[in-house]
Image: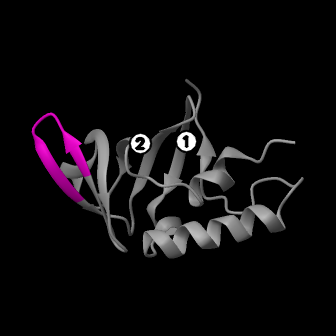
Amino acid sequence: MRENSLDQIIAHELIGLECEVLESPNKSEIGLSGEIIDETMKTITIQTDSGMKMIQKKGRVFKIRYRRKLLRLSGDLIIARPEERIKKGLLIIKRSKGRKCAVCGAKRLKR
């Protein structure tokens, strides 16, 4: 049985994925899109058409293209050092086998 994509994204490397900022307290960040080129505990860096943009994870909602699907992901769910987030995500997947998304806050978007 395949695991839910929403569970898997927590345990996946974000660098290299396409991303768009859907919601942010900073109105100038909304609509920024491009490839994630770096990730820290509290930020992601996106390579946009106008250069690199560093964006806080907290309080933001991202649309991420993952395995040909568009996922809506709350930045609050991914606040952690990338290596710790990946370990935590693997544990979540292991515990939730056969159940609906254990992480939620993220919803699958229609194409």
Q: How many marks?
A: 2
Residue type, label 2: Leu
Image x and y of residue 52, in percent: 15, 49
Q: Earlier in the sequence, mark 2 or mark 1?
A: 2
Between the residue at mark 2 and the residue at mark 1, the CA separation in whole angstroms equals 11 Å
- Left/right placement of residue 61 relative to residue 71 reads left
> Is 49 one of the magenta-colored residues?
yes
Q: Residues within 10 Å of mark 2 (few under 14, many from 20)?
A: some
On the image, which quarter does residue 12 sit in?
bottom right
Main secondary structure along the magenta-highlighted residues: strand
Where residue 104 sits, quadrant-wise, is bottom right
**Which segment is the magenta one?**
46-54
Who's the residue at 64% across and 66% down the image? 89
On the picture, is 11 further left or further right than 91? left
Which residue is labeled 1 in the image? 71
Dot 1 amino acid type:
Leu
80 up-or-down from 4: above or below = below
Q: Are marks 2 and 1 in contact (CB under 8 Å)?
A: no
Residue lying at 68% horizontally and 63% vertically, measured from the top left: 103
| Residue at 87% over, 55% down | 99
Residue positioned 25% across, 42% down in the render = 32
**109 left or right, relative to 29:** right
- Indicate which disc residue 17 carries: 2
